[in-house]
Amino acid sequence: MEKLKLIKITNQTLEAYPTDNYVYEVSYCGKKEFFQNAYDAFESDMFLKESKGEAKVTRIYVKPASEENREFEAACKQLGFPRFPYPKQIENFQKSKFYYQRLWIRENADTLFFFGLWGVFLVFSLVMVILSKG
């Protein structure tokens, strides 16, 4: 376990565990989850159960907030009004309507490939038979 570090928040000095400036994104079949710890990302249900370890984990750098922004947010919170109203475009994440179809295709890709190859062979054979008789 990491050692506690002294950090300064406004006019207070507190002890806290250091954190990385990274967020870990786990993505599979168009679905994404974000974690603040790499261990949580690799132990998530999406990584272990849904994708069986095939999900992509991406480390994304997050720029820390500046001291001025933190002081401004603390002052706004103390005065009781939000820093800024969030735009209406911010929505909660929703699964796309084709999420389960893509998941099924990924799970059955080898079977689909076999039947596709077999179909191409049948069409090619049919064309050859037609051309040889004509």
Image (spheres, rainbow, N blue to C red):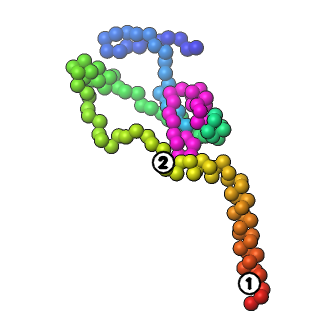
Mark 1 Cα-neighbour bin, 10 Å: few <14, some 14–19, many ≥20:
few
Of the residues shown, which amino acid type is indicated by label 2?
Answer: Ser
Q: Residue at x 31, y 26 (%)?
A: 69
Instruction: Name which residue type carries label 1.
Output: Ile
Mark 2 and 1 residues: CB-CB less than 8 Å, in contact? no
Which labelled disc corresponds to residue 95? none
Left or right: residue 6 compared with residue 115: left
Question: Is residue 3 magenta-colored?
Answer: no
Magenta-colored stretch includes residue 40? yes
Q: Is residue 75 visible?
A: no
- Name the one closer to the observer, 79 or 58: 79
* Quarter containing the C terminus: bottom right
> Vertically, is 24 above or below 116?
above
Residue at the spot of label 1: 130
Residue 83 at x, y percent in the picture: 26, 28
Image quadrant assignment for residue 9: top left
Q: In screen coordinates, is 100 left or right of 89?
A: right
Measuring 26% from the left and 34% from the top, which residue is drawn there? 85
User: In the rendered image, is residue 131 in sight?
Assistant: yes
Q: CA distance from mark 2 to mark 1?
A: 44 Å
Image position, residue 53 (x, y; %): 65, 37
Looking at the rendering, which quadrant does residue 127 occupy?
Answer: bottom right
Kind of element beneath mark 1: helix
Residue 69, relative to residue 15: is it above or below?
A: below
Q: How many marks?
A: 2
Q: Is residue 38 above or below residue 92?
A: above
Which residue position is annotated with label 2?
A: 96
Residue in the picture at 66% in, 48% down? 107
How many C-alpha atoms fall within 10 Å of the one at disc 2: few (<14), some, or many (≥20)?
few
The magenta span reads 27-47
- The residue tagged with tag 2: helix, strand or loop? loop
Q: Position of residue 132 (x, y in %)?
A: 78, 86
